[in-house]
Each structure stands twice: as structure tokens, then as C-alpha cells.
Amino acid sequence: MSAVLQLAGVTRIHGAGETEVHALRAVSFAARPGELVAIMGPSGSGKSTLLTLAGGLDQPTSGSVSVEGVDLATLGNKGRARMRRTSIGYVFQDFNLIPALTAAENVSLPAELHGTRPRAARRAALQALEEVGIADLADRFPDHMSGGQQQRVAIARAIAGERRLILADEPTGALDTETGEEILRLLRARCDAGAAGVLVTHEARHAAWADRVVFLRDGVVVDESGSDPAETLLDSGAR
């Protein structure tokens, strides 16, 4: 089965000379339709860098990142932005909601920017907000929501429409345990329905929802396993 996301020999270097930092070193992996992949590793291991590259928000120093067979480097900024509006859903750690827009408007904005009629875009937004359990907050502004509610809006934005790839950077960080489990169940269901998902997490119980665990340390893949994530951590020597 063709991969939705393919990283091939991806290296990302920040800075130069004495300030040079290798965020990723020759990383290769794929996420296929129906698969949820968990990315684990200590702070500074390159997890978030991998996600920003997968979402076309940054470009590799070397290697390639492809989504549905298209090398993101060949698209240009406008092409990558178009893909994020249509094919890639991204849940950011800091939500990235627009304060001047309501929850429904934040969720519907990518579709409207792509040319979807406002009424149809709002309909899809309301459906996504219903899925994450906050349809009643559709017309509320982010400043009038709790952190957990804002996180749900961010997740609704990422799953609205027909997203083929969902990227989630610690998507349960602002949520209580029960709500976090609901969100992971939702991500799992989206992947079971045919999307590919990549979940960055530091918690083994969250990674347990994934089909496969990729463990990073110092920008290098040190383990890749479909086994219990707790075993992956131990086998990798991370404690």
C-alpha cells in the first residue's frame, strides 16, 4: 500500500558553524493509510521538527518529504499551503487559533480559503466540533474558552473535511485524562477510516493507541516497533 507520508533520509540542520544543531539526522519512515504512528523520545530529540517537516511548515536540509507521492519541496510555499488546507490536518502544541474568529470560523477557515462556499465550510466545521464534543461552543471566541476547549477546536480544525494525513503534536496536553482518551479514540477512528496519522507524544499510554512506535534520540531513529511502547522505551535504554 502506498504511503501517505514518506520521509527519505531527512536531515535538518539549524544554524551554522559553532551554533549548528542537527535536529534530525537521516531519518526515514512512512505512514500508510489506516495507520497511526506514534513518535516518542526525550525533549530535544527532534519530534516536533519531524512534524513541522511532515506538514510542510519547514524544509529539510537534505532528503525528501512526500505526501501522497508529492515531494513537498517541489510545491513552493503556495502549493504547500494549499496541501495543508486540503490534505494535511495539523494539531499544534500551542493551538494556533485566531483570536478574532469564533470556534466555527477557526475550523472552517482552511476550507473557505480553498474556495469552499461559506455555508458548506461551516457545516463541515460544525460536524467536526460535534465530533470533539464542543458543538455548543461553535460561536464562542478562543479567549472565552478554557485551554482544553481551545485544544478541541484545534483538533476539530485538523480533522474537518477529507484529511488524508493528520499530524498531532501532543494533542492531549491541555486535556484531562478522560477527554484525552476521547481525542485519541477519535484520531484512532480517523485512521481506521483510511487516513494516516502521526502522533507526537511522551506518554506510553497514548502511544499504545498507535500501530507503530518510532523512537527518536538526538535526531536519530533508535527504534521502530509495533510492540508495547513501554517495552520500546526500555529496549531503547530511555528511563
Image (cartoon, helix red, strand yellow):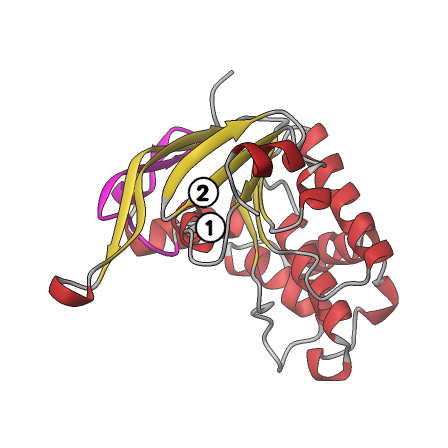
Q: In this view, does 110 lie to the left or right of 127?
A: left
Residue type at mark 1? Answer: Lys
Q: Mark 2 packing: few (<14 Cα in 10 Å), some, or many (20+)?
A: many
Question: Where residue 153 sits in the image (x, y, percent)?
Answer: 71, 64
> Looking at the image, is 165 positioned above or below residue 123?
above
Asked if one can make out residue 154 in the rendered structure from this viewpoint, the answer is yes
According to the picture, the residue beneath numbered tag 1 turns out to be 47
What residue is shown at x 82% (from left), y 49% (from top)?
A: 182
Q: In this view, does 112 lie to the left or right of 136?
A: left
- Which SS class for mark 2? strand
State which region is magenta: 57-74
Question: Where residue 172 sits in the image (x, y, percent)?
Answer: 70, 57
Q: Residue 196 carries which label?
A: none
Q: Mark 1 packing: few (<14 Cα in 10 Å), some, or many (20+)?
A: many
Q: In this view, does 16 lie to the left or right of 55?
A: left
According to the picture, the residue beneath numbered tag 2 turns out to be 216
Question: Where residue 227 sits in the image (x, y, percent)?
Answer: 64, 25
Q: Do the residues labelled 2 and 1 touch (CB within 8 Å)?
A: yes
Q: Does the magenta stretch include residue 72?
A: yes
Residue closer to the observer: 162 or 67: 67
